[in-house]
Amino acid sequence: MARCIPSVGTFKRTALAVFLATLLVGIWTPLRGLAGEPRYNLKVGGTTIGGAFYPVAAAIGQVLNQKVPRFNVTVQTTPGAGANIRLLDKGEIDIGLSVTPVTYYAYNGAGKWEKRYPVHSVMTFFPNAMTFIVLESSPIKSIADLKAKRVTAGGPGAQWEIFMEPVLSLYNLSFKDFGRVLYMGQAAAANALKDGVVDAAFLGGGNPNVAPTPSLASLEATHRFRPLLAPEPLLDRLKERYPFLDKIRVRGGAYKSQPQDAVWLDAGSMHLVASAKADPEMVYQLVKAIYEHREEIAAVNPLARDLTPDRVALKTGTPYHEGAIRYYREIKVWKD
């Protein structure tokens, strides 16, 4: 009996089918391996360029995108802490950077907040050394001299008044006593000070003993500045009234413009915040990923060195998200 010999076309079709089947196996096998592992596209609200917060958020995004496949992180600039809390409330971001005093007031619907915002702390990072800054050539020598002067007060919606007003109260001053208040990000505020648009700028952020704030480092590249510092006993008095405020000793030389050790206002810690309604599993995985890659994040931005066991779950008056608490209990840093 004659044998049926396949045509060349049949061989080609068969080879193509085998190739496609092999290709599909190669594609689908890793996807099957990832099946059941949630993937998260996270929008993170940063702050304005020039401060200490945004570079840390960018470092977190960079490391997680490279090292943790379950996360795709996008960091966007925003006016700052207060704006991030409102963006969380609207569902326009998933995670936000804030500073503990702003979050505390927002959560409690106090101060200028028109309602209570359901925001929870996720992870606490570094302290924030901030104060009024003038150029070294300025005749302004003290915070008391700021009456009727032009000053900056953070980006629109950042709500820096929460920690600026207590400092001003030490000198019987308030925002009403300024000649003009301009709301702008830190980089813009430093430039406004250089150009003589303002007499003083409220600047800083982060722990200068680890790394200088970009806005102040940029400022003193061309202009020497002078920080206007409240005496340490007055800062101690503030801490008694406002538990989220503190003081921080900044070593001499941390800024070229400050050759000697000096005590600055710690305006509250930078922390990550989320809506109380955020998925607990997502928050758990995010906290786990950041904490377990904190050394890589610190290699990108040294301020992440303050992400330590004694600070990561620091209690500052705002409740922590249940997903974060779950992880902190696992690593035994949570204190009930």
Image: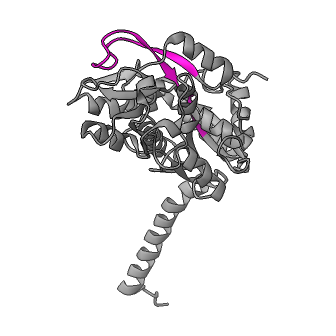
Q: From this view, report whether residue 198 is shown above or below residue 42.
A: above
- 23 displayed left or right of 291: left
Colour setup of the view = one colour
Question: Which picture quadrant has residue 98?
Answer: top right
Q: Nearer the viewer, residue 129 or 132?
A: 132
Q: Residue 230: image x %, image y %? A: 48, 18
- 187 displayed left or right of 247: left
- 305 displayed left or right of 274: left
- The C terminus is located in which quarter? top right
Q: Nearer the viewer, residue 302 or 25?
A: 302
Check the image and name the residue furthest to the right: 336
Q: Residue at x 53, y 30 (%)?
A: 173
Check the image and name the residue furthest to the left: 222
Q: From this view, report whether residue 134 is shown above or below residue 36.
A: above
Q: Nearer the viewer, residue 179 or 256?
A: 179
Q: Is residue 50 magenta?
A: no
Q: Residue at x 42, y 36 (%)?
A: 148
Question: Which picture quadrant has residue 199?
Answer: top left
The answer to whether residue 295 is seen in the rendering is no
Q: From this view, report whether residue 223 is shown above or below residue 277.
A: above
Q: Nearer the viewer, residue 34 or 178?
A: 178
Q: Residue 187: image x %, image y %? A: 34, 41
Question: Which picture quadrant has residue 322?
Answer: top right
Which range of residues does the magenta coloring cover? 246-272
Q: Residue at x 54, y 54 (%)?
A: 30
Q: From this view, report whether residue 231 is shown above or below residue 63.
A: above
The answer to whether residue 240 is seen in the rendering is yes
Q: Residue 8: image x %, image y %? A: 35, 84
Q: Residue at x 46, y 28 (%)?
A: 206
Q: Residue 31: image x %, image y %? A: 56, 57
Q: Is residue 254 magenta?
A: yes
> How many badges with numbers are in the image?
0
